[in-house]
Amino acid sequence: MKKILFTLIGCTLLMQCSQKAGETNQYSAQPVLFSEVQITDDFWSKRIETNRTVTIPYDLQKCEETGRINNFAVAGGLKEGAFEGIRYNDSDVYKVMEGIAYSISSHPDSALEKYMDDLIALIAAAQENDGYLYTQRTIDSTKMEKNAGPKRWSYLQHSHELYNVGHMYEAAVAWYDATGKRNLLDVAMKNADFLLTVFGPDKNHGVPGHQEIEIGLVKLYRVTGKKAYLDLAKFFLDQRGIGDTRELYGDYCQDHIPVVEQTEAVGHAVRALYMYSGMADVASQTGDSAFVKAIDRIWDNMVARRIYITGGVGARRSGEAFGDDYELPNASAYNETCAAIANMMWNHRLFLLHEDAKYIDVLERTLYNGFLAGVSLEGNLFFYPNPLESDGVDKFNQGAAERQPWFNCSCCPVNVVRTMPALPGYIYAQSKEALFVNLFIGSEAQMPVNGIPVRVQQKTEYPWNGEVAITIQPEKESEFAVKIRIPGWVQGRPLPSDLYTFLGDNPDKISLSVNGEPVAVKTEKGYVSLTRKWRAGDVVNLNLPMPVRRVLANENVAADLQKIALERGPVVYCIEGMDNRDNVLDMRLADDTRLQTRFRGDKLGGIVELTGAASTIRGKSKKLTAIPYYAWNHRGANEMTVWIHRK
């Protein structure tokens, strides 16, 4: 079955690009198709398999139970009934479909494929003759919820009319790539062609309040070669902050000033990060340097002043928004799971633009902490927000103090579904003469480098162990560079800024060898570049020491003064009441206390646990046990904190 290379990063996802003949503007590096990478390690393979066997069917069941799927049948005249749910529920179905496409690409499933074909038939029936697709309005345009607007496009600030179909475009491209079928792609193109008659310089100047369609339009362009789709994506971005012909939405929607003049990460975090990702996509095709300069400035602001140690973003519950500089509260932190996914999307795109490992540093931190906390080990319970502190009572998770099986607004559970099976596409990348190893995950992959097919195999027990063996298998002897990322955390930098620092130095040294011969660890833009004539069976051995490190926050972060966080490798830790005789919020840890590590295969799916001596606020001795942040709240509601008082 023919595969089309295309950008796959979407609300979660990775960019697997397909450039048309003659195109020159594109990402500097290209990701390796997720379908060309097989994850073999014990850590991620279990989570991806759980996503396939539990989370996908669970989310489909919920979409059926809540009327999300039935809405398409009613809109298509195949059933009678009223619209159920919220105006943006169509997008939840599209996101699950995208995840199914990725999953089927790796694990063919004839029954699930038939389910998808039947579902696509419902969506096609729900599409109006001119291409418009928005089930609530089609079912009964006289009974629209307030935020949908009384007429088409009349309240774009919150209607999600364009947001919904943007996710449909992403699902359509993923389905076409996985199966070669055009059934959903034809629906997407019919809708996009309709939008071309509505929006443009001499037409409607409205822009989506919730960005997303920009990403989908670029994906459609990459597959179809129809430049008008790319032009429309750029038009939507260029119109933001321009108030000559319409009322601006303000900074909540990143519509306060033109995008090329923006300097700070502001407003609703998911909307913002989707926009920044769309700007990167458009810039990769158009060569728009103003877009690149703008997102570089915004990234500098976010990483230096507006991101949590877990990689989570969006400090404020009000507006699900970024806060001011250094506004990083712990108990009230929002850190929406969708925002973590979008943060990974954006940082992967920035790596593709600049070939700099600092973006993968942020991506990896978010992956193992801010994102992974969002879904339970069992795959059917979720966090919407992800605070860094809990008293075990506050119902922070959309009305509950524990993980929830579903939400009225369930963007996070369905976003997880499409992110997990796309993870393989983050591990490697390639340029004309180089192979990038970005993440350390046991895997096998194939890619062309310098015109020669090359197989790569990684063996590692990361993130619990920093020893990595990388075997290079070119089809024939060939000279090229293997660029191996040396994470910032092993070089003394939690993040590429001064927002967080380690207390003390790491006395252990990184070691690197090729076929047993030591190699000096000299980095450029975060990579060791090994250029040589590679032969089949050449082995690179990398050892990244993983002592327990104490992390300090910048003194401007008021919430973390006189506190430390614990980190080992890429994993951020927390202390939870279940392991520490309930009360953890008043625990104190001395700077010189030695912490022990032990792998516990019988606990929380298998973790490295930290233990050591601590005390209470009154000075009473107490044993401290820390677990990975992503694993908390699996044993009931109880106290938890990432930031621990220093003694």
Image (cartoon, rainbow, N blue to C red):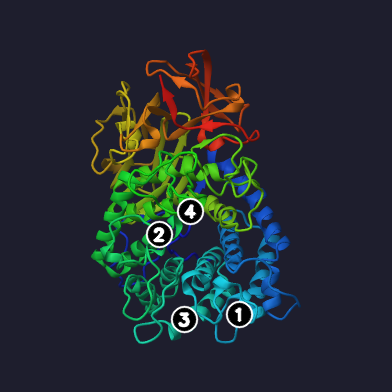
Q: Residues within 10 Å of mark 3 (few under 14, many from 20)?
A: some
Q: Earlier in the sequence, mark 3 or mark 2?
A: 3
* Distance between mark 2 and mark 1 Cα atoms: 29 Å
Q: Quadrant of the N terminus?
A: bottom right
The label on residue 127 is 1
Say which residue appears at 52% left-offset and 79% top-offset.
Answer: 191
Residue 434 as seen in the image, left or right of residue 378:
left
Q: Quadrant of the C terminus?
A: top left
The label on residue 272 is 2
Q: Residues within 10 Å of mark 2 (few under 14, many from 20)?
A: many
Q: Residues within 10 Å of mark 4 (few under 14, many from 20)?
A: few
User: Which residue type does callout 1 highlight?
Assistant: Gln
Secondary element at tag 1: loop
User: Which residue type does callout 3 highlight?
Assistant: Leu
Q: Is residue 80 above or below residue 569?
A: below
Q: Earlier in the sequence, mark 2 or mark 4?
A: 2
Residue 423 place in picture, x, y as percent: 49, 49
Q: Earlier in the sequence, mark 3 or mark 1?
A: 1
115 and 148: which is toward the camera: 148
Say which residue appears at 50% left-offset and 24% top-offset.
Answer: 586
Q: Quadrant of residue 265?
A: bottom left
Check whether the beta carbons of the residues at disc 3 and disc 4 lie within 8 A of each other. Answer: no
Q: Nearer the viewer, mark 2 or mark 4?
A: 4
Q: Which residue is mark 3?
A: 195
Secondary element at tag 3: helix
Residue 316 appearing in the image? yes
The label on residue 318 is 4
Residue 195 as seen in the image, left or right of residue 350:
right
Residue 448 place in picture, x, y as percent: 37, 54
Q: Quadrant of residue 595?
A: top left
